[in-house]
Image (tube, coloured by chain):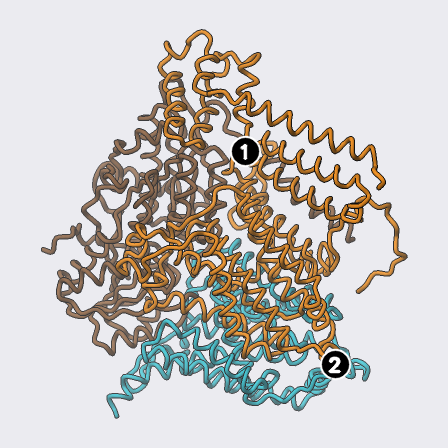
Amino acid sequence: MKIRKTTLIIGLLLLAAAVALSAYTLGAQGSLEELLFRMDTQGAAETDAKMKKARDRVLEALAEGDSAKAFRSLDRYLEGFGDRLDLSGSSGAELFVYKNASSLTALGVLLLISGLALTLASFSRFSKYRATLAYLVLIAALFCGVYVLENLLGSDTMLLTTLKKGAIYALIAVSMNLLNGFTGLFSLGQAGFMLVGAYTYAIFTIPAESRAQVYQYYDGGLIGFSLPVIPALLLAGLAAAFFAFLIGLPVLRLKSDYLAIATLGFAEIIRAVFQYDGLGPLTNGSNLLRRFPTFSSALFPFTVAGVCILLISLLINSTYGRSFKAIRDDEVAAEAMGINLFRHKQMSFVISSFFAGVGGALLAMYQTTVQASAFKASMTYEILLIVVIGGMGSVTGSVLTSFLFIAASEWWLRFLDNEQVIGGVTLPFMRSGFRMVVFSVVIMVMVLFYRRGIMGDKEFDLKALFAPRVRKGGKDRG
Amino acid sequence: MGEFFRLNLPYLLGGISVGGQYALIAIGYTMVYGILRLINFAHGDIFTVAGFVMVYLSATMPLTVSLPLTVLITVVLGYLVERAAYRPLRDAPRMSIMISAIGVSYLLQNLMWYVTGGLAKQYPTIPFISGSVTIFSATTKMVTVITPFLTLALVVLLVRLIGGTKIGMAMRAVSKDFETARLMGIKIDRVISVTFVIGSFLAAVGSILYFTNYTAVTPTVGAMPGLKAFVAAVFGGIGSIPGAVIGAFIIGIAENIIKAVGLTTFSDAFTFALLIIVLVFRPTGLFGEAVNDKV
Amino acid sequence: MKKFLAALMILTLVLPLVSLGEPATAGTIVIGIYEPASGDNGAGGKQETLGIRYAHSLQPTVELSDGVYEIKLVEVDNQSSTDKAPSAAQQLVSEGASIVLGSYGSSVSIAAADIFDAAGLVAIGVSCTNPQVTLGNPLYYRICFLDPFQGTVLASYAKDAFGVKKAYTLAQLGNDYDVGLVNYFTKAAEAAGLEVLGETFPEGTSDFTAYLTKAQNEGAEVIFSPTSTTYAAQIITQAAANGLSIPILAGDTWDSSVILNAAKGTDIKVNVTTFFDEGDTSEKAVAFVKGFKEWVNSSPEYLAANGGNDIIAAVTALGFDAYMTALEALKAADSGDREDIAEVMPSVTYEGVTGAIAFDENGDALRDQAFIKASDNAAENWTFVKVQGIESN
């Protein structure tokens, strides 16, 4: 058995670093309470009432076990009175470790995983799994990166909010791509299935004690129990899939744009039904549902969306996936090859809706409230634009674009809505609504001039990054 | 009987009037679809833009100027949309053009938000057609009575245009077989431009009638009538102008009957349910021709 | 061409990053404005924002014990939509807002409550009247009255003023403001012995003739339709065109120049409950009305946001009071620290142009009176009718 020595050595070094890091982090995890007093060498807090109040607030939060509040108060304390505190030497280092304990742990985990991967890769027996290992490290780096960012910046910053919503939209966009990009079924019902998922999740997870408050017009509603989060997420997907199964029976026999308009119509019908007063004890009528369990860390949507997207990718690369693509490229030929058109279309439709349902449930968690009126056709259009800009038939394209789309529309371009003064000159046009105009112009440019989207129908590939670039002599598929 | 008639006449009048306005929009859909096989999602927004243009123009100009100018601007807009957003994609897959249509609709709506600030604008009163009229016992606006007649007159004109002129013949040829028509030397781009011009013209007229009746103009007000007009076009058999008109009247009246019965929650849902039933059981609609897939 | 476009697009996406993230400098306190500027409630949100901006133009600074702080307003648009609301709220949190004002429309406020709560940020609801806004959200306060109160007031008024026996309610399907208010109105009206017939219309409806015909055919003597202003204009003009003679009642959303514009020249009687009356003769109110009118006429932009005239919407007055209440909170806390503000908030009081403001244990303003106004269709203005409480008299 051949062993690559350098790889092995680097791998083992990384492992050692991981162990050292975790040991130090654990060792330095002193009590913050004691540290607070040690930092204040001159006892300034005892004489300054304001400073004492700020410090007491940290201690209070620690006693309550509310770590988010404790961190917030600690930051405020250090910000306000940092010049009077002694932050040099070991107290400074301890404070750093204390504040960044989670980031350091994440770094340790990342080191551990990459170390293990490199060590394994150094044995020739595993060399054929090298690509998989590389992806594994990449995914671990992504997750650790998000976790570190969250701890450094706080989970309530715009960046993290964008990442959370981006991850959810990524799942929904990929599920739509499965249908539109891979199977060639032009469906515009995504918002309807998301609505089903979101409502199913919300209805079954609202804690029993909150039901009376949420269903204030319907005497606490129909359901008296509540499910844990994961089963409810699955149930959300299943409910959406069930609706898709029923709707698919008639509409999947329709051709391209007829299918589009029929699914759009069904989404509208679903919305009307969920708002129907007669179903109030179940759906709360037109009123919003809330108080169901939500997530605070971005890792949750990343994990759920990641797993779902992985499953979709596996499906796309399976025999079924190849059949889907055959149907997309030429229905008649696919049928002649013995592919059962209806069965495969139905399968793609139901599976896509399952994930749209899960995505809808995640969206409900992100929003913390859910109301049927938000799931309009315009939501479907948004997702469709993501899919198109990312590239029909590219999973990674949809994922990338989801993040860019959300960031641009809800964060980066927000400044366009407010008057901007640069160098004493007030820029014209900048008032509320300008953001959406600029945004839609950008989209139109994309649609007209980059018809195949960012990724076309290709996927992001590690090998393409590392391998030397070879031009393929203009053999671009159209 | 008299009592029943008195109570339900307003529903019927409302239905016929709405139907007439849907019809004018539906013709635009059905003509574009007949030729380009494209659901022009932006059509409803062009209809709305026409409403806003009228609001702004009438603030500064007399009606005799602003009315024709509104129609003219709408027609130019329809032409420009085709030129800028659909023509570059002529040879692209159908899905791309449709997405471009959705993009245009998104852009127009956002643009209207930006310009108007999102406040509902009050449509100007047009003398005579804004006036009230009493038919038997029901009071309604004059426009309600005029709409169906004006619609029918325009449709007759249009059918004669398509049946009896050279450009009409070209349009029929293009809708029958796009590629062959092109090979036979028909200037496709010109035919398509004319189609959009006619569609936008009717949308502008429809918009004047519609907003005279329902006087608040908002950026998204055209979305629902647009979708319903499309449903009407499908219902009547897409590509068929008389079909679109009859479909529109049926939908307009049926919708008001649904409301009269008390199923108000489902009045929109009903329209879509009707669409799906038609698509599943008679995909060619009432008057559409069967199209065979070419392999 | 393509490369140029690509470069341009990348530029538009990257540029904002440069101009973003300007933290509040020392001596500045940020007040966040969480209001819709687009979507169904865009019009109302803008009028509310105008009130806040006017208040800010009068008092752009606040004096605390350690110096004078400049107040910076940060506006975000929640697009009247619960799915866009969280990121808008988040934007205010990360811009370092010390306190948040808004929103017009209850559902977006409810959707943002958890985010403000997690950030320890106090929010003052300006005109969100749904009980769920403050219920279970310890940091959400509000300065307006609540729907159960408003619905009951309207029902009493319908009975007192018109002596009706049958009412017809019309609400937008999927809008919890309409549906909630109609619900409370119906409860109170039925308790008072009225017969109520209720219907809902789907979003995007323009044709209300069928609903109005129904109301007439069923013999309703008053129509209660607390919809958003967009639909309100349609309802009024169509009622006029169809020769309806039934008075229309509505809630605070209808106190807007859009309504007056639609009712102008018709003989439709419109009555609304509201928070503020322009003709109020108290010294504060008179000064506010005069000052605001001057201010709003000073810029075409303000005028456009107010609907093209200088009629004062009640939400504008509320916006003004909300800003002033926020200043009181800053003074009481003697800092811009979120936790300090949260501590003092329950005991903050303010004598505003819409009346005295104090909070109960839920964080709701203690208000027991609503103004009732009627439209004067000839003068295109509101006329004050009476101050109505819950008690039927």
Placement of C166 over or under C149, stated as above or below: below
The answer to whether C225 appears left or right of B112 in the picture is left
The answer to which of marks 1 and 2 sits earlier in the sequence is 1
Structural distance between the alpha carbons of marks 1 and 2: 56 Å
Residue placed furthest toward the left:
C393
Q: In the rendered image of this protein, which colour is used for chain B? A: cyan
Look at the image and tell me in which quarter the N terminus of chain A lies.
Answer: top right
Decide which of A170, A428 is in the foreground and name it: A170
Q: Residue at the spot x=31%, y=26% of the render?
A: C332
Q: Residue at the spot x=87%, y=58% of the render?
A: A474
The answer to whether C3 appears left or right of C76 in the picture is right
Give the residue pinned by disc 2: A336
Q: Is any part of residue A214 visible from this angle?
A: yes
List x then y, in percent, for residue C215: 26, 74
- Dot 2: few (<14), some (14–19), or many (≥20) neighbours within 10 Å? few
Give the residue pinned by disc 1: A151
Q: Quadrant of residue C358?
A: top left
Q: In the rendered image of this protein, which colour is used for chain C? A: brown
Chain drawn in orange: A
Placement of C102 over or under B292, stated as above or below: above
Q: Is any part of residue A435 visible from this angle?
A: no
Q: Secondary structure at mark 1?
A: helix
List x then y, in percent, for residue A343: 62, 76
Q: Secondary structure at mark 2?
A: helix
List x then y, in percent, for residue C212: 30, 73
Placement of A50 over or under A388, stated as above or below: above
